[in-house]
Image: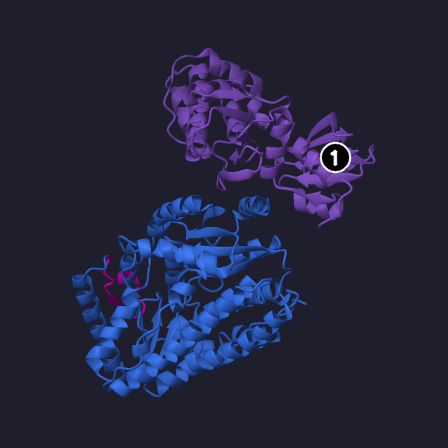
Amino acid sequence: MSDFEVKAYPELWQALGVDVERFDKARQMLGGAYGRIFKSQANRPAKMAYFDTMIAELFGARIKELVAAKEAGHPVVGTFCVYIPEEIVVAAGGICVGLCGGSPGSIPDAEKILPRNICPMVKSAFGFKAGRICPYFQAVDFVYGETTCDAKKKTWELLDRLVPTHVMEIPQMKRERDRVLWLEEVKDFKAKVEEVSGSRITPEQLAGAIVTINDKRRVLQRLTRLRAANPAPISGRDALLIEQIAFYDDPGRFAAKLNELCDELEERVARGEGAMPKSAVRVMVSGTPMALPNWKIHTLVENADAVIVNEESCIGTRYFKDLITESNRDMEAQLADLTDRYMRIDCSCFTPNDERIDQVLKEFRDSGAQGIIHYSLQFCHTYNIEEIKIREACEREGIPYLAIESDYSQDDVGQLQTRIEAFLEQVRG
Amino acid sequence: MNIGMDLGSRALKMAVFQAGQLIETKLIESGFAPHQLAEAMLRPYSPRQVMATGYGRHLAHKIFAHGVITEIKAHALGVRYFFPEATTILDVGGQDCKVIRLDRQGKVVNFQMNDKCAAGTGRFLEIMAATLGFSLAEFGSQALASSHEAPINSMCTVFAESEVISLKNHGVPAADIARALHLAVVNRLCSMIRHLGEDSQLVFTGGVANNPAIAVLLQEKLGVEVAIPHLPEMTGAIGAALHAYAMDGKPRCD
């Protein structure tokens, strides 16, 4: 069955200044794609129902929660990057949401202004705001950007004309002086959030928020461990969807619902029941993030009877592999803990970044994958170049490896399908 | 009897095997409804297995083929039929080009494929030949006849065509332009080949292997032996037929 509808809330959208007529077409397309890609799967865990509802209510129930939080004076912050410390927003009683940036539909809006030859995620995100076709963008108090790449940091200057955009400076190296810089940036972020909420964040509030977000990360780690079973108890695309929803949903509710799903997956593993047969080739994806609704690679791989078992990516393990110390009750110490945790993120924007190569190999072993597909968004120079080191490591270790560079368009799916199928033939031997 | 069918962007190729031996090949243009044409090609035969490869493989599987393999695997198998020791393959077809590296046993260990653009493919050569007013056969021989190299900087079909027009209007002889265009393609292919590392021999397949200038220039630029199988455009179909033969009698995995 593939009938699925993302629900329409035209009055809510109208109130937020969304271009309702256009956005409604995008909503219908998203529902159609979701039906084809997700609802048509066999052997889906029953507890995926919650996440289906999250997509059905993506532009309704969740938006209403944002609006209500804002009306109650809580900050609602839009972000694009796993470096933004969401614990601080949660400590202030606010909501942190990942913004839209995963769809080709908004790129023509961006290309009216931005150069064509930059990353599709940056263009897509900018286009959503420029075209007023993302209720999340319309609902946030402000956007927090970062300096992880040139396309982003220069686009934020232009985005600021459309929605207040603050920028955190992400260091490019991991020396002590870079850590000091980052700590100052974290403090500035806290001050900005406090300015919007009108009250100081207490150490108790921050301690609570650290536990809340740690819990969200712990349950995502649990999901990753369960995917290591053979047969995999859940498809890669469902797991990716959950990871994408982690950036939108209320963290407490999300963790509870995902724990329920993990309980079900645990039972499946005990019974030896999989989303796909045990013979399916197990693939790990490494590289750039996949913002909702970018399901391109997962769909191509899994339609070729393989299963994706891990995402070494900002949408995946890079977001949740590290936790924050929970014991401190002193603001300075807490902010230092937070800074230390965020400095461990192994994004390719750092040089050198060799810990990522080790991390890729570790996740390959832990996930029981048989091959790695490196996925890089077009024009993402840092990931595209770091890919060379990942490839060399895979050659050294004898790991079957395929590198893909792609954007959000569908014009290369024929070529990609051939390359992915040939890669799977190579793994099968 | 086992049949391999390669449903390519420009042509449909069929290879017929009887008792493990190649007995017949056929080639027709893909046209608008390639799957109907392919079915018509198959009609006179009663094969035990039909294996499809090429861009149309999945639709062929739905309609008439028993299984599919990718062009990468098909070329690996097809090349090994003629050159049992080959470890590096270059296939240049109508809309893509690929370099395939095999281990000693003939297993694919690595491959490179062009992205979505037609630069460096048969289609590029077709369009450029037409721009110069040559038939495809003349185009290659004219390129070989010239020893002057006019500069062509662009590999984009559209931009290269503008460069050709500009060179024509500067009075550059057509044969020199033909040579430059062939060199532009060869340079691009060489960088793909070098990306997979050194090898002492290159087996060149696909319709473009019939162009004498590309093979000669490749050999010059790479400094390695370039070998071309009998009917290079049939390699994929032959590989698919060999796979069908290997699968014959085994339980179907689809």
Q: Nearer the viewer, residue A138 or A345?
A: A345
Q: Nearer the viewer, residue B151 or B51?
A: B51
What is the quadrant of residue B155 in the picture?
top left
Expressed as whole percent of the image width and height from the top left, the position of residue B106 reads 58, 34
Expressed as whole percent of the image width and height from the top left, the position of residue B190 reads 43, 28
The vertical placement of A369 against A57, above or below, is above
- Read off the chain for label 1: B
Residue shown at 50% from the left, 36% from the top? B118
In the picture, measured across the screen, residue A139 lies left or right of residue B27, that is left
Judging by the rendered image, the residue that carries numbered circle 1 is B3
Q: Nearer the viewer, residue A7 or A55?
A: A55
The blue-coloured chain is labelled A
Expressed as whole percent of the image width and height from the top left, the position of residue A142 reads 31, 73
The purple-coloured chain is labelled B
Helix, strand or loop at mark 1: strand
How is the rendered protein coloured? by chain
Magenta segment: A157-172
Numbered marks: total: 1
Residue shown at 36% from the left, 23% from the top? B151
